[in-house]
Image: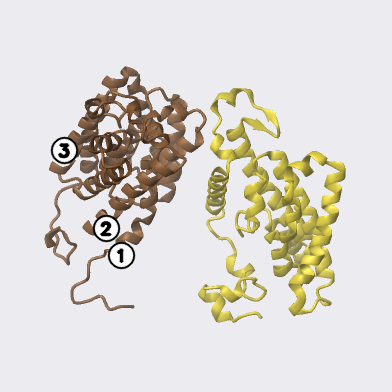
Chain colours: A brown, B yellow
Amino acid sequence: MSSLTKISVSPHIHSGRSTAGIMRDVLISLVPAAVAGTVIFGWTALLPIAVCIIACVGFEALFNLIVKKEQTVSDLSAAVTGLLLALNLPANIPLWQCVVGSLFAIVVVKCLFGGIGGNLVNPAITARVFMLVAFGEMAVSAFPVDAVAGATPLSAAKLPSLLDLFLGNYGGAIGETCTLALLLGFIYLLVRRVITWHIPTVFIGTVFLFTFFYVGFDAVEALSLTMAGGVFLGAIFMATDYVTSPSTAWGKVIFALGAGLLTCLIRYFGVYPEGVSFAILFMNILTPYINQWTRHKVFAGGVKA
Amino acid sequence: MSDKKASLATLTNGILKENPTLVLILGTCPTLATTQTVIGAVGMGIAALLVLLCSNVFISLLRRVIPESMRIPSYIVIIAGFVTVVKMLVQAYVPSLYESLGVYLDLITVNCIILGRAEMFASKNPVVSAALDGIGMGIGFTLALGAMATIREVFGAASFAGIAIPFLQNYKIAFLTKAPGGLLVYGLLIALVYAVTHGRAPLKKSFSCEGCVHAANCHVKSCETKGEVQ
């Protein structure tokens, strides 16, 4: 991190970027994953995607209308939340559950805490966890890959081949299976400088290393387990949310390290199948503290209170 | 005239403005534990109302007799006595409710609402006001529990007071009947009441440090400046 990116005193130059612009980039970067999901799971995968986006945008507009707040739909953040949530769901999910999940993500997690920028935790991740817990009995079959990875991580025979895992040719949530598409999105976000490399790289690296040691130094199996499930989707798109991840470089590293470790701990030793969501949710809550620990020193100031 | 107004205010305070569950945030344990079903919640509310009414009256009557240093044990003995009476009545006449409430019926003894009202109100006010306060707070508690239980049972178990709601059968959100769902609904209701009352919960007024159980460990500035109790 060069010193140029640190926050300094005025005068400032406006970079010309806007929230809507950044959100548009995130939406574009998610298109490959959505397309891959549609190819793999058939056109029915488009239904949850459409329902989630429409519901998220609709609920945000409705909420702002009811509480007479400034309309914030045009910043596209609700659409991003909807798309991310849908990509985290299985293609055959009942559509009413999508609507309830969107309601939870937008109204409970985001709007009630003050709208964009005010939310403590990532709306899409929290809604996914909520749906997993809320519709637990119905969704047992909905998260098959992480369920396999979680319950019997050593039965590698059940895992698809590396190529299938890379191309996404196996069961799971709509957007999480095709690693290739997710990496394309990652590269786009890096090129457009929407996110930095810290969180995704450290997150995925931590999961890989932990798994590598856990499975007994078998690199192929470790790589398979890292690519299966929601690690890539979570690390690239959910953990990098500006609002709920640390803003300093070291903070991001700590955040990603913690999320990666928690993901593995929950996967290999926990009872819930979905480690990634819980891990990110937990680190979201720690973000303000991480920010505080890793805050830049103020030049010629900062008298201790 | 103003007397009448004041006593009416005492009665209605507990329902919304100083609702024990949703504004004063007292008695959260029975609130979360017994609101899975409407019947259990309302039963709990009524049982607590009876105990609250009796203990408020009794403590108000004895307020000049009970020595300051022995007040908490005295309150607990009085409350426990009434809880035993109510418990036996419930066991005798509504055994199914007795079964479903289980240990929470006994735990009314240490319910913060009842102890809190004894401390904050009954020990400082005449009998009639104390009785009205007990009824108001009891109704407020019952309504809050009933509202919470309605949301949790209708959307979580697709039934109301044990009667199945046919068209919701396929749309159960089982999460709401579990503990985290309870906390979620509880938080949302608190937010709703805060929005309706514009956050004008009379916190300072009713929580003067004098008589506050937590005064010794309290970090709130206003409390410290007013001095400790014991």
**Chain of the residue under the numbered disc 1 shown in the image:** A
Look at the numbered discs 1 and 2 and tell me whether their residues touch, using CB distance below 8 Å. Answer: yes
Q: Residues within 10 Å of mark 3 (few under 14, many from 20)?
A: some
Same chain assignment for discs 1 and 2? yes
The residue identified by callout 3 is A188
Q: Residues within 10 Å of mark 1 (few under 14, many from 20)?
A: few
Q: Tell me residue B74's x, y (percent).
A: 79, 71
Image quarter in which the C terminus of chain A is found: bottom left
Cα–Cα gap, marks 1 and 2: 8 Å
Label 1 vs 2, first from the N-terminus: 2
Among the 4 quarters of the image, the one containing residue B14:
bottom right
Q: Nearer the viewer, residue A106 or A274?
A: A274
Residue type, numbered disc 2? Gly
Q: Which residue: 81% across, 68% down?
A: B59
Image quarter in which the N terminus of chain A is found: bottom left
**Chain of the residue under the numbered disc 2 shown in the image:** A
Left or right for A204, reference A91: left
The residue identified by callout 1 is A293
**Chain of the residue under the numbered disc 3 shown in the image:** A
The residue identified by callout 2 is A251
* Residue B184 circle label: none
1 vs 3, front mark: 1
* Relative vertical location of residue B224 with respect to residue A247 in this rendering, above or below: below
